[in-house]
Amino acid sequence: MKLNLKIWRQENNKSKGKLRDYEISDITPDMSFLEMIAVLNEELINRNEDPIAFDHDCREGICGSCSMFINGQAHGPDRLVTTCQLHMRKFNDGDTIFIEPFRAKPFPVIKDLVVDRSAFDRIQHAGGYISVNTSGNTQDANAIPVEKKDADKAFDAATCIGCAACVATCKNASAMLFVSAKVSQYSLLPQGKVEATDRVLNMVKQMDEEGFGNCTNTGACEVECPKGISLDNIARLNREFLKAKYKSR
Ligand code: SF4
Ligand code: FES
């Protein structure tokens, strides 16, 4: 395949960025999207030009670092996959592809397609930990009964990989889907109940301090989330937050 790429180039978060045109050929349908960028980067390096900076780590859809906007969609046109799991068979010979970083105020561009998502780390740190007796008498986790339906919901919430597609897609740059997944994965389990009040209050406070917008029930986050995190989690987050506010009065 031969493709026309329009890629966002930006030196750092102080400089102004712009879309630059690149032509690339000999791309096969079996290549992943990141492999396609790697082919372009090899050409750029051979021409003594600066390669495109992009984030990646696992290339297996589990680390959440390969975040980019492709033709106006977070992680591109495929459903329930991250950019590293997107393949060039989703595109046609001669296509023009726009490639941009995830855009949200709390995620400043570091370079080109790489953004600083440490705001998510700070929200998770604010959530803290769960109390586990590690004195040598740790209870076997299987000895604590958990209803199957709760275990399934907690597991589904725990599949959030922190990629930030939900924020980048949301017109308000809201982080509610991410935070709701992190709150839900603990609030549904007995082990997560001890610190539940502090956890939800601290995470929501940190989310607000980082400058994320509020949720207006648009639902774009759920549609673009590569892990299919459900909006039900946002409803649960709201309930947990109200409960915690009432308790802490
Ligand atoms: S909720 Fe989905 S889109 Fe948002 S960070 Fe988690 S995995 Fe990514
Ligand atoms: S590189 Fe880890 S999810 Fe894509």
Image: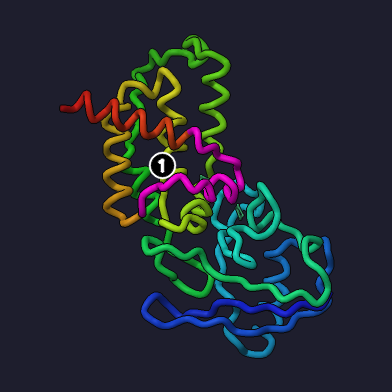
Name the amino acid type tagged 1: Val
| 193 w.r.t. 86: above or below | above
Q: Secondary structure at mark 1?
A: helix
Q: Is residue 211 left or right of residue 229?
A: left
Question: Compared to 72, does 226 lie above or below?
Answer: above
Q: Between residues 23 and 95, which one lies in front from this camera angle?
A: 95
Q: Is residue 187 left or right of residue 93?
A: left
Front-most of residues 129 and 133? 129
- Give the percent coordinates (x, y) of residue 211: 31, 57
Residue 137 in the image: x percent, y percent? 38, 13
Magenta residue check for 217: yes
In the displayed orientation, state which residue is furthest to the bottom: 47
The way the protein has been coloured in the rendering is rainbow
* Rendered location of residue 49, percent (x, y): 60, 88
What residue is pinned by disc 1? 179
User: Residue drawn 60% across and 41% down?
Assistant: 228
Segment colored magenta:
213-232
Question: Magenta includes 190?
Answer: no
For the point 50% across and 63% down, the residue is: 102
If the picture is divided into quarters, which one holds ligand 2?
bottom right
Q: Is residue 208 left or right of residue 68?
A: left
Left or right of residue 121: residue 228: right
By secondary structure, the bulk of the magenta-drawn segment is best described as loop
Dot 1 alpha-carbon crowd within 10 angstroms: few under 14, some 14 to 19, many 20 or more: many
Q: Residue at x 49, y 10 (%)?
A: 145
Q: Residue at x 57, y 63 (%)?
A: 68
Task: Give coordinates of residue 125: x percent, y percent.
Answer: 34, 43
Q: Work out whether residue 140 or residue 157 is closer to the camera in this orientation and state it.
A: 157
Where, quadrant-wise, is the C terminus in this rendering? Answer: top left
26 up-or-down from 178: above or below? below
Where is the N terminus found, in terms of image quarters?
bottom right
